[in-house]
Amino acid sequence: MRYLRLPLHLCLFLAAVCCTQALAAPAQDDFSAVARDVGPFASAIVFNAADRSFSQPLSVTVGELSMRVEFAEHQPCPSHGLLEWEEQATLSRSGGLCKVATLVASAPGHPDFRQVIAALGGGGKGTLSDLNLSFYYLEQGAVLPQLLLSGFTGGTHCCLVSAIVGAGDAGQWYAVQLPKQNGSGPPWVVDVAHDGGRQFIFPDKRFDAVFPSHDLSVGPDVIYEYAQGKLNVITRQPRFRPYMELSVRILPTEEDVPAPRSREVNGYLAGYVATSANAGQLQAGWRYMLARYNPQSPYLLKWCTLDKSAWGKGRTACPAPYVRTVPYPQQLALFLLQTGYITHAQCVALGYDPEKIQHEQDAIRAAATAHWHATHPG
């Protein structure tokens, strides 16, 4: 079993480095809004399917916090774990045997914490091809650090899975999963406002494959902060406004912006308008979108002007003459309202009153259905 300890002289060295970085923070210009990467003060690769040297149990002691990762071969595949995703349940139902990693943690005044992390493998569905752990002080003033666990599931467009394990002040343990992301490697911890805070920035996965394909989707940044066992969305706090304003300025670059009216542009524009809304620049972002969106995108929503009762026997889709396309600006406005990027009042101000739209669609559908019944007696 490997052991990792953080000696006092290393703690003092890291503290000095952090202090130097704080003193060297950029001036209050455009670059001061760039989130600053915050590295862990201790980290380890616990498992890597491609390298057997990183496939051994590991113990870590940081101050009064102790963490141990145990491996057990030929165990029933777990249906869930700290790093949980859908394929784990499928693997468990298959009745197979797995190499299972389990986290054991201890701290003064806390009962021992023990929970399955995941099945380990590499290449097989439901198993991780690597497992990493990192230690951070994610909360200012915290006595004990938090453990950030992460692993790679493999698969198309997938998947970094990660979780935070921390000891609460009242003797409890917290385990919080972070949003899944594309790619691999531990998630970055950053200080967005250069004020000593610790945040995560992930693209909003709700934008994935909504307006274009997955590869052409652009999700706006969402800023998260860990506090007392919860992962809170804090994107719109005033201290992050400079970061959001800079994001708006650097998004429309010649290298990244698809050509106006092109097949790819609507996905980019959705992320751009959402970022503009986060920066308090919704109207400017909306005007930018109106000059560039593709009204013929194959990803535009459709709706049927004929009630299903009149479709006819055996039909599972709306008859072609009754299909209508939702204009992209309307689809985008209602999506931004649904996902919380704009308010109801802002949606109405953009020209899209949800209740009025629904009322108009209902009226059109009722009239078309009544006409159909009148012209198709019996």
Image: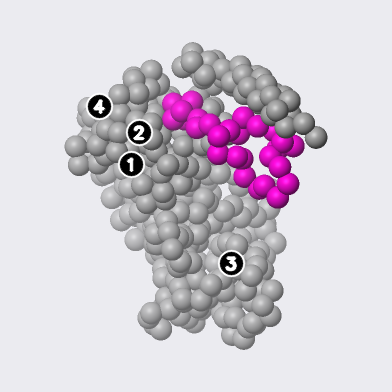
| Type of amino acid under label 4 | Gln
Q: Which residue is mark 1?
A: 263
Which of discs 3 and 4 lies nearer the camera? The answer is 3
Q: Is residue 272 visible?
A: no
Residue at figure coordinates x 30%, y 56% from the top left: 13
Whole-angstrom CA distance, mark 3 to mark 4, is 46 Å
Q: Is residue 238 magenta?
A: no
- The residue range painted magenta reads 304-332
Circle 1/circle 2 CB separation < 8 Å: yes
Whole-angstrom CA distance, mark 4 to mark 1, is 39 Å
Label tally: 4
Whole-angstrom CA distance, mark 3 to mark 1, is 33 Å
Q: Is residue 313 magenta?
A: yes
User: Along the polypeptide, which appears first: circle 1 or circle 2?
Assistant: 1
Q: Which residue is mark 3?
A: 87
Whole-angstrom CA distance, mark 1 to mark 2, is 7 Å
User: Along the polypeptide, which appears first: circle 3 or circle 1?
Assistant: 3
Picture layout, residue 287 above or below residue 298 = above
Q: Which residue is mark 2?
A: 294
User: Along the polypeptide, which appears first: circle 2 or circle 3?
Assistant: 3
Q: Secondary structure at mark 3?
A: helix
